[in-house]
Amino acid sequence: MARVVLVVGVALATLALGLGGCVAVVAGAGGSDTSAGAPLVSGGRGGPAVPASWEAMDRSAAASCPGLDWSVLAAIGRVESDSGRSELAGVASGANPAGAEGPLQFEPATFAAYATVGPGGATPPSPYDPVDAAYTAAHLLCADGAATPSGLGAAVADYNHSTVYVETVLLLSWALGSDPTLATAAATAIAFAAGQLGAPYLWGGTGDGGWDCSGLVQAAYASAGVALPRVAQTQFSAGPALAPGTPPLPGDLVFFGGSVSDVSHVGLIVGRGLMVDAPHTGTVVRVEPAPTDPGASFGSEVVIGVTRPWA
């Protein structure tokens, strides 16, 4: 089936969510196009999704392109090489099967065109030097329009033309922007869910032909090594529940229904007041607003509570 690409411009995103769908962007030429678009899943469930040293580097590099948020660079680094921690070919040396090089996976011609030496980086600039790679990625994204909200989606699509890639980077960027200390397990679950956007709702679905709400979050966390029960009621009961007044974080699960013993729906929080969920028959896996205050209305249901399965 056809997929859709998220756009993070405020007006367009609001319009898209209001229509129950996503706004398409057209991918241009000149991106890295280095993979089939599947997000890299790192081993283990603990630790930060982005190490503090990489966060500092990404913040510094993003500042070279006023308007570009550091979380975009951080999300790209997480997807491309688990923020430099991947031992796959082409990260520290050599090239991957598509010819891409370094922790941000540049095609050699693309790196040569935008190569930038960052503070303390290698001279001449090297795609394997994390600082040079981050500053070069900022240069490339800035040239493609990522400094403006309306241009960000297309700029990421230029970096890699896969729609799964674009959706994953944008959702991880939202999550990191909301929680810079985002846990690896939460990031992996969000990346998995991003890869399912546009898939049809299927009652009882666990990925073969579609998803229902609890099947989606169960599979998302299974990809991060976290085992969840199968249905929304038992997922809620498994907790751990957030204490009253605790702000939700990306990766948390929000549950809806009639009461604590009548839980019928669940969504995966991704930040910015949004969640990924598989709503109901006739819809697709999508991003939509996520009320999180207990008792808040959600259609004919109310918010029952929020849990943190990765804690």
Image (tube, rainbow, N blue to C red):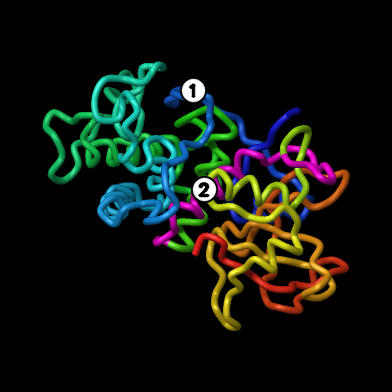
Could you tell me residue 289's position as x and y percent? 69, 61
Residue at the spot x=84%, y=73% of the render? 258
The mark nearer the N terminus, 1 or 2, is: 1
Could you tell me residue 261's position as x and y percent? 81, 73
Instruction: Name above or below for residue 179 compared with residue 17.
Output: below
Horizontal side, residue 146 vs residue 246: left or right: left
Q: Circle 2 — which element?
A: loop
The crowding category of the residue bearing disc 2, from other C-alpha atoms within 10 Å (few below 14, some 14 to 19, many at least 20), is some
In front of the other: 275 or 6: 275
Mark 1 → mark 2, Cα distance in angstroms: 36 Å
| Residue 251 visible in the current orientation | yes
Q: Circle 1 — which element?
A: loop
Q: Which residue is mark 1?
A: 29
Instruction: Give the magenta part as a residue range.
Output: 180-206
Residue at the spot x=49%, y=63% of the render? 178
Residue at the spot x=58%, y=70% of the render? 240
In front of the other: 213 or 68: 213
Question: In the image, which disc is placed on residue 297?
Answer: none
Identify which amino acid the numbered label 2 is placed on.
Gly
Could you tell me residue 253's position as x and y percent? 63, 62
